[in-house]
């Protein structure tokens, strides 16, 4: 599986599908991890910092908050990055929002163009635990149309894997600022802590 994953990762790095389709993506594809990872984090799309500076998933301001959450579970950032797989629904920075505020959300077409890569990563890594982060990633497992407060805070079994969703950790997110939603985030992190102990992650 390691050789096959390495082959797929090379193909992802060489992928030009979105660029050829005319989408204004920027920077290289961003993901990290190895075939033996027992946990996979799936975000929405890389941000500007990831694409232009660090080339590491979740290394901008949102990533800092995500790793503060993981620290509550008992994972230090360096350990987490070394042990687990981190990727996203779309692999490349979609560019800034036309309004000038925040990043542009990848279109459904872009998600479809990138879908093969995400499905290959999940199949080849075959993680025991998946943590979808943000609405776009959560929809991959729960479908569209459901509110985050119906999903965040739960522990689910989907396709033989434990799935524990988290909201997008962006500082601009009004959702995570609400006290009742912070309770749901704490509940989700509690589930992660239990899974960490159960599986020895």
Image (tube, rainbow, N blue to C red):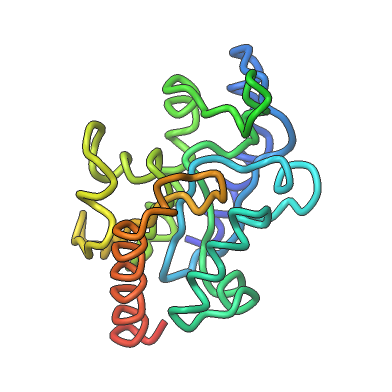
Above or below residue 161? Residue 141 is above
Judge left or right: residue 84 versus residue 181.
right
Judge left or right: residue 2 versus residue 53.
left
Expressed as whole percent of the image width and height from the top left, the position of residue 178 reads 37, 54
Judge left or right: residue 105 versus residue 93.
left
Tell me the quarter of the image containing the C terminus.
bottom left
Expressed as whole percent of the image width and height from the top left, the position of residue 65 reads 56, 62
Q: Residue furthest right?
A: 53
Above or below residue 104? Residue 1 is below
Q: Residue furthest top?
A: 22
Q: Residue at x 65, y 25 (%)?
A: 16
Task: Give the quarter of the image for residue 128.
Answer: bottom left
Front residue of 191/127: it is 191
The total number of labels drawn is 0
Q: Residue at x 24, y 36 (%)?
A: 143
Q: Residue at x 62, y 17 (%)?
A: 23
Judge left or right: residue 188 versus residue 89.
left
């Amino acid at each position: 599986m390691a050789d096959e994953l390495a082959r797929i990762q090379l193909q992802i790095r060489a992928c030009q599908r979105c660029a050829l389709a005319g989408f204004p993506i920027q920077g290289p594809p961003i993901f990290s991890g190895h075939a033996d990872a027992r946990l996979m984090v799936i975000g929405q799309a890389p941000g500007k910092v990831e694409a232009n500076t660090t080339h590491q998933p979740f290394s901008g301001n949102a990533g800092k908050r995500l790793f503060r959450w993981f620290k509550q579970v008992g994972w230090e950032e360096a350990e987490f990055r070394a042990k687990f797989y981190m990727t996203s629904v779309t692999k490349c920075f979609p560019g800034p929002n036309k309004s000038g505020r925040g990043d542009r959300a990848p279109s459904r077409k872009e998600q479809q163009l990138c879908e093969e890569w995400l499905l290959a990563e999940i199949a080849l890594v075959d993680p025991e635990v998946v943590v979808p982060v943000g609405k776009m990633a959560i929809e991959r497992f729960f479908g569209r149309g459901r509110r985050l407060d119906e999903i965040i805070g739960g522990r689910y079994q989907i396709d033989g894997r434990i799935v524990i969703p988290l909201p997008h950790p962006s500082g601009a997110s009004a959702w995570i600022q609400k006290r009742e939603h912070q309770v749901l985030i704490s509940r989700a992190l509690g589930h992660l802590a239990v899974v960490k102990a159960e599986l020895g992650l």
